[in-house]
Image (cartoon, rainbow, N blue to C red):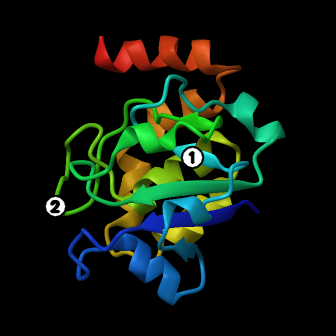
């Protein structure tokens, strides 16, 4: 099992915050200062140079989601984290952004990372807490399976190009 962490700045709607719900169930460790995020974590960052891949599994002990408004986050502050990874093309299943690509909730992002890293059971456990959660896996079943079978970041991008094409 991979430890889950979230940096939360409380800029999102608390009623829709997926991290708050995971925290309530003891499934994630929430930090309130970016400096509290371990430097060794796999940091989910859509501005990262590299895409997450199954090759990352060998060193990942934790995954961190940035649960904040991307409008207010200064991404230059993320430079100290060397293990920043973007997610490949996936479609949101949450009620706010259903069907929109690259607009995942934090729980969807964490679940996607878990599936890609071979931890599908853990992904299912966190998604089950949301009435729409397992729909994320159904909606993205084919690409997630292909991503999970990719060798490395380069192969991930090749698979992604089939969906963005």
Quadrant showing the N terminus: bottom right
Give the residue pinned by disc 1.
Answer: 43
Quadrant showing the C terminus: top left
Report the number of numbered marks: 2
Q: Where is residue 61 in the image (x, y as percent from the top left)?
A: 77, 54
Q: Position of residue 2 (x, y in %)?
A: 73, 60
Give the residue pinned by disc 2.
Answer: 96
Other-residue count near label 1 (Cα within 10 Å), few / some / many at <14 / 14–19 / ≥20: many
Q: Position of residue 3 (x, y in %)?
A: 70, 64
- Would residue 142 appear left or right of 71 to someone viewing this image? right
Q: Residue at 58%, 74% (x, y): give it.
A: 28
Which numbered mark, 2 or 1, is in the foreground of this view? 1
Outermost residue, left side: 96
Q: Position of residue 26 (x, y in %)?
A: 60, 85
Label 1 secondary element: strand
Other-residue count near label 2 (Cα within 10 Å), few / some / many at <14 / 14–19 / ≥20: few
Up the image or down, 158 lies above or below 124; here it is above
- Is any atom of residue 129 visible in this view? no
Q: Mark 2 or 1 closer to N-term? A: 1
Label 2 secondary element: loop
Q: Residue at 49%, 78% (x, y): give it.
A: 22
């Amino acid at each position: 099992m991979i430890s889950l962490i979230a940096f939360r700045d409380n800029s999102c709607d608390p009623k829709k915050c997926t991290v708050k719900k995971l925290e309530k169930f003891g499934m994630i460790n929430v930090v309130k200062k970016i400096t509290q995020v371990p430097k060794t974590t796999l940091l989910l960052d859509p501005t990262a140079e590299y895409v997450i891949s199954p090759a990352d599994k060998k060193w990942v002990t934790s995954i961190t989601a940035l649960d904040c408004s991307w409008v207010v986050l200064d991404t230059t502050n993320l430079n100290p984290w060397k293990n920043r990874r973007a997610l490949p093309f996936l479609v949101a299943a949450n009620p706010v952004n259903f069907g929109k690509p690259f607009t995942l909730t934090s729980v969807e992002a964490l679940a996607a990372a878990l599936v890609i890293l071979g931890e599908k059971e853990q992904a299912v456990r966190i998604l089950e807490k949301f009435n729409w959660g397992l729909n994320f896996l159904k909606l993205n079943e084919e690409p997630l399976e292909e991503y999970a079978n990719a060798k490395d970041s380069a192969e991930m991008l090749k698979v992604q190009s089939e969906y963005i094409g």
